[in-house]
Amino acid sequence: KYQHPKNGFFSSIIKGIVIKIQNIILYIHGFSGSGLGSKAQAFTSYYQDKLFIAPSLSYVPDLAITTLCAMIESYIILDINVHLIGSSLGGFYAKYLAQKYDINVVLINPAINADKTLVKFIGESPNFYDNSHFEWNQEHIEMLKKYQVNPVDINAKTLLLLQKGDALLNYKEAYRYYESIETCQTILEDGGSHSFEKIEDKFHIIDKFFNN
């Protein structure tokens, strides 16, 4: 668990010179994705009057998690409430971060056992943004294992969005993982796809979840 540091002189100065921000929404994209993917852009458009950030993260799990932790901790120091949205592999990361920092999280067709589901991608993988390629290897799989969370330890408030038509991830894994967790609200839909079709229809539900 993350321990909130005591506010020192430097953080006090920062608080005095920045506009007071109460909430920030951090979106975490999936494997081979970026902060400029279609789903991230849909959220960016919807939250244009709020502080919404969708960083483009390294494909290396340790680097991605290090970046996200640094971002979250910088917000916490300034007493900013952080809300997480994670899709696919981003959902796997978000699950870990929500538990580590005890913050609310929305998971969209999340990878529950990423260290197993991503084994099939070992080798050269494409980046969906510019069609460049990167090498995904066993070392990256081993990194993912460090960020697995036992469901009995989960107490972060969670909204789980699943579509049965997800052809990449078996929705039943996430459904079964969260079905006994009291702090989780699940929305399960027939049809759909891995990208979660018509995610825009769920924006008001996500807003309500974050505001409660």
Image (cartoon, grey):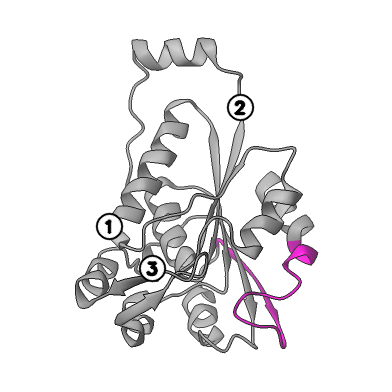
Q: Residue 106 location, x and y as percent?
A: 59, 60
| In contact (CB < 8 Å): disc 1 and disc 2 | no
* Numbered disc total: 3
Callout 1, which amino acid? Asp
Residue 6 vs residue 163, the one in the foreground: 163
Q: Residues within 10 Å of mark 1 (few under 14, many from 20)?
A: some
Residue under the point 34% across and 53% down: 65
**Residue range (magenta):** 183-202
- The mark that comes first in sequence, 3 or 2, is 2
Callout 2, which amino acid? Ile
Is residue 198 a member of the stretch shown in magenta? yes
- Which mark lies nearer to you, 1 or 2? 1
Q: Image quadrant of residue 211?
A: top right
Question: Does residue 43 lie above or below 118 as drawn?
Answer: above
Q: Report how far apart the C-alphas of labels 1 and 3 lie in the structure.
A: 24 Å
- Which mark lies nearer to you, 1 or 3? 1
Q: Residue 118 location, x and y as percent?
A: 36, 80
Q: Image quadrant of residue 139?
A: bottom left
Residue under the point 52% across and 10% down: 16
SS at mark 2 in the image:
loop
Query: Would residue 58 appear left or right of 81 to someone viewing this image?
Result: left
Callout 3, which amino acid? Val
- The mark that comes first in sequence, 1 or 2, is 2
Visible in this render: residue 44?
Answer: yes
Is residue 63 a member of the stretch shown in magenta? no
- Which mark lies nearer to you, 3 or 2? 2
Residue under the point 50% across and 84% down: 169
* Residue hosting label 1: 62
Q: Residue 51 location, x and y as percent?
A: 64, 37
Residue 158 vs residue 16, the one in the foreground: 16
* Residue hosting label 2: 21
